[in-house]
Image (cartoon, grey):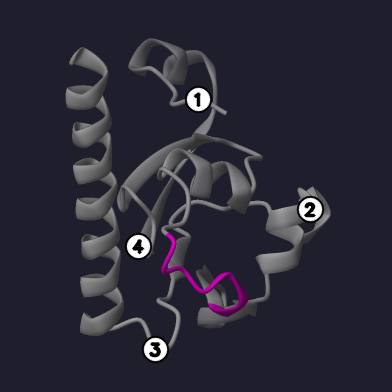
Amino acid sequence: VKLVSPLQSVFTETVSVTVIGEVRNPGGLRVVSGANMLDALTLAGGPTTDANLDGVILVREESTGRVRYALFLKKPFEEGRLEFFPTLEAQDTIFVPRKKGVGLWGRAVRIAADVTTFATLGFLVIRSTD
């Protein structure tokens, strides 16, 4: 999966979609027509560690109005089962919610783990130069 360059988009049909929530790079994307939700999630940098893939919401504008689809994607995502990822349409919005229970304490623990990792690496580098 790759971003479509402006020159390519002249020759290739693309659609605009939005990915929000627990992904590394949320925002608007242009994807090749026929791309699926996994393509968009990949272009958005993938889900964060706090993402609840069993609570993904696809919001789509249909003739009857705006429709929300609840998707359970954790197992298909882990197994790479593409048939479970819907094909995207123009103006689709994908919302990846946060896991329950990941609040301030969960973020603090993650920061502490990162600091410990960097401190350990720094110690090993200093020790190896002695």
Q: Which residues are magenta?
A: 49-55
**Which SS class for mark 1?**
loop
State the CA–CA distance, disc 4 to disc 2.
23 Å
The one nearer the camera, 95 or 101, is 101
Mark closest to the chain's N terminus, 4 or 3: 4
In the picture of the structure, the residue carrying the numbered disc 4 is 20
Mark closest to the chain's N terminus, 2 or 1: 1
Q: Nearer the viewer, mark 4 or mark 3?
A: 3
Asked if one can make out residue 85 in the rendered structure from this viewpoint, the answer is no
Q: Check disc 2 and give the amino acid type.
A: Glu
State the CA–CA distance, disc 1 to disc 3.
34 Å
Query: Do the numbered discs 4 and 2 sit on residues whose CB atoms are within 8 Å?
Result: no
In the picture of the structure, the residue carrying the numbered disc 3 is 101
Please provide percent x and percent y for residue 57.
52, 75
In the picture of the structure, the residue carrying the numbered disc 2 is 79
Query: Do the numbered discs 4 and 1 sit on residues whose CB atoms are within 8 Å?
Result: no
